[in-house]
Amino acid sequence: MGKFEELVFHLMIVVVTLLVGRKFTHEFSVPKYAALATFFVVILLLLIAKLFRGKQKLSIYISLPNVAWFIFVAASFVSTIYVFITNRFYFFYSINVAFFIALTAILALYISNRFSSKELITRAMLTFVASGVVVAIDALFNYYLGRSMFFGQFGERYSKMGIKSTIGNPIFVANFMTMLLPIAFYFIFSNEYGWWQKRQKLTLAIRLFSFFSFLLFLAVDLLCQTRSEYIAMIVCSVAFGLLYLLYSRAKKAEQQSLFQAKLKRFMAVFFIGSTILVL
């Protein structure tokens, strides 16, 4: 992935997260869909230009989750046939949803193929966290001050429904905060980000920023009072603990097997060498 392509992707994260356009549309999400589609088309055009210039080879890796996603895309388009037959008034709405699902499937395929190194992945994750901090601060402003950094006077103070931000209503805000919690958690405790390993001061600054971000996300999550997010956090934490335990055991067993293999090779070499010396 080139630097300019990565820059466009990071701009897409920030713009889609923070973009609001209530002067043009009532829903927060409509301009975000347009921005996401626009940025992604730009990225695809960059890739197509590289293909024509011979700077990029066409190789696509499709995993099982990608296959499942495209099956869901096919089901979305097939479902619009029934809508067209029974109620043509809603057909264009349904087909638009199907096209957006197709866009997300292609985007997922792009991410799984282009983000091939830990360095690229962690940089994108950090951009998500930084964008989420702005969303969280704006949500807290809405709750405690009744004002938004983007909208000015906005709702009542200390009201659950006032915890809105550039993402949308409190449910969407809580969902976004919950998704960012494990990412911030990773940056707090990870020993290697894939970049700047030797710059200890910068690594410390990222850890402190991530810790501050984690507290912000958790505070907004609790203020949103969304039970589904609480359940999701508990279930995901338990699942993470179990999977990490299994991973640790498998890694330990792998290390033991490697040690045993090395020991066997050493004993074989030692035995052959000793035999030769004795003879």
Image (cartoon, rainbow, N blue to C red):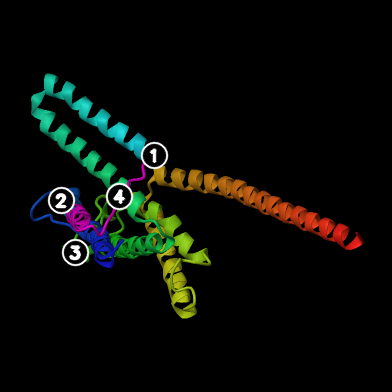
The answer to whether residue 64 is magenta is yes
Q: Which residue lies under the disc numbered 4?
A: 110
Q: Which residue lies under the disc numbered 3?
A: 150
Left or right: 118 in relation to 59: right
The residue mark sitting in front, 2 or 1, is 1
Work out how far the residue at label 1 is from the one at label 4, CA to CA, in angstroms. 13 Å
Q: Quadrant of residue 56?
A: bottom left
Query: Which amino acid type is shown beneath numbered disc 2?
Result: Ala
- Disc on the earlier residue, 4 or 2: 2
Q: Which residue lies under the disc numbered 2?
A: 34
Q: Nearer the viewer, residue 149 or 250?
A: 250
- Disc on the earlier residue, 1 or 3: 1
Query: Which amino acid type is shown beneath numbered disc 3?
Result: Phe
Neighbor class of circle 3 (other Cα within 10 Å; few <14, some 14-19, many 20+) is few
Is residue 104 depicted above or below 85 in this figure? below
Q: Please, what secondary structure does the residue beneath circle 2 have?
A: helix
